Amino acid sequence: MRSPARLGLAVAVLALFASLLSPPPREAGAASAEISDARVQVKFRPGSAIRLRRGELRSHSADLAPLKRLFGSLPDLRIERLFSTPERALDRRRGEIAARSGRPQPDLNLYFRLAFDETAGLERLLDSLNGLDIVEIAYREPQPPPPPVTPSFVTRQGYRGPAPAGIDALAAGATAGGMGAKVRLADVEYGWNLLHEDLDRVRARALRINNGSFCDPFLGDDHGTAVVGELAADRDTLGVTGLIPRAALTLVNSAVDRAGACVWNLADAINLAHTSLGAGDVLLIEQQARSASGFVPVEWLPAVYDAIFSATSDGIIVVEPAGNGGQDLDAPEFGSPFPRGLPDSGAIVVGAGGAPACESWPGAPRARIGFSTYGSRVDLQGWGECVVTTGYGDLYGGTRNTFYTGGFAGTSSAAAMVAAAAASLSSFTESRTGEQLSSRQARSILESTGSAQDPSIAGQIGPLPNLRAALAAAAAM
């Protein structure tokens, strides 16, 4: 175990449909824009077979005349596919996943981005698009908001220790595969500082998938650095130690430089991460979505839900934060069940729970922290405060390559913790049996063996993983 530094926090909030994750009460500054003034995302109905050819939408089966009349009034319209993977590759993979999983798969080729120079009348355009029979849904393109300033809190790396205080990564690390050697974990983020002194192994071995030309909309990479440190910081004599230091990582940026504009395309980033993973691997989405009332899981966004559904159907374990909006996902406005009455995506949704001996938020260990979104769709919790990891510099300073924090927080830190637990469990299972766990299997084992949520604060966020118990349950299967 590495030497702890001093103290601090690293909370990251974002303000629109998806974002870096931190409690809204800690936000420092509003988002530059919650939704795009000049871009729309549209999904056409299944079976319409609409495709983009030479800058125009065409179909051999659907009547596009009403759509073309509408587009004819938009001389500055530019159309592009939302998902960058080639059409044939997406179609082939959709068929393969449907055959293996027995579940119909969304056609990601039916998503498009519409861009404009003039923004007047955009709401009328959305109403017109959503009124067409061939359109399933059209909505303004989400924009990423900026991260907040990070306050400081006393902490320790107790999350690695025995249950019920921690997830018992120490016990898991003593087993074959328990440190993640048999799995790859993909982290979808804005950016990372891979020059950090405690990320040597990540820097040398991580697979970087550039989702177009990389850009950082907020000129800061501490959030991603903190997540990667929590997951896989070097196992040596300095700084901190990651929960799964032997896992292979894939890093995918969700913001893309398009002609000088930093454009956020989370759904495509998830899809690209999917391509680097196989059954039993883990896909961590370190972003959150904004609903009309507050932050919620990213599967609230239609394109993101479909990308997640595709990944879990392909055997990939997907982990997403519940969000830091304090929202009740069982409320009527979210549909029943969340999201919008759609089938379970298969992802593990993670809430933020209290940490032992931490004074950042009121409440008992494993009780829901007030900012955490909650509800029957939230499966598991992780520490939502006082997480020691790389980045920020409030715990230990010097240069940015030696920064450490003592208070990474929110559903960001919690989701990384649960993703590491899922990776450890999956790697252990493959090492022992040669078989891969699905997202639903991993979720079920971690839920049934975890340390129970403290009920003193209402709102379900689920248990805290207990890897010693989870690995024992997996071994008995």
Image (tube, helix red, strand yellow):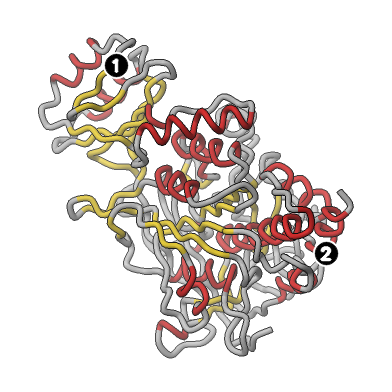
Residue placed most toward the observer, 106 or 401: 106
Residue placed most toward the observer, 428 or 344: 428
Quadrant of the image occupied by residue 257: bottom left
Q: Disc 1 vs disc 2: which is toward the camera?
A: 1
**Quadrant for the N terminus in the image:** bottom right
Quadrant of the image occupied by residue 181: bottom right
Q: Is residue 211 left or right of residue 442?
A: left
Q: Is residue 226 left or right of residue 120?
A: right
Q: Which residue is mark 1?
A: 59
Instruction: Count neighbours of disc 1 (C-alpha within 10 A) and say few if under 14, some if 14 to 19, many if 20 or more.
Output: some
Which residue appears at 62% of the width and 48% of the height?
Answer: 317
Image spot of residue 204 (x, y percent) = 46, 74
Which residue appears at 80% of the width and 53% of the height?
Answer: 455
> The disc labelled 1 sits on which kind of residue?
Ser
Q: Is residue 157 left or right of residue 412?
A: right
Instruction: Count neighbours of disc 2 (C-alpha within 10 A) and say few if under 14, some if 14 to 19, many if 20 or more.
Output: many
Image spot of residue 73 (x, y percent) = 13, 21
Residue placed most toward the observer, 54 or 335: 54
Cα separation between marks 1 and 2: 54 Å
Q: Which residue is mark 2?
A: 468
Quadrant of the image occupied by residue 139: top left
Do tag 1 and tag 2 residues touch (Cβ < 8 Å)? no
Which residue appears at 22% of the width and 10% of the height?
Answer: 65
Image spot of residue 402 (x, y percent) = 46, 85
Which residue appears at 60% of the width and 61% of the height?
Answer: 416
> The disc labelled 2 sits on which kind of residue?
Arg
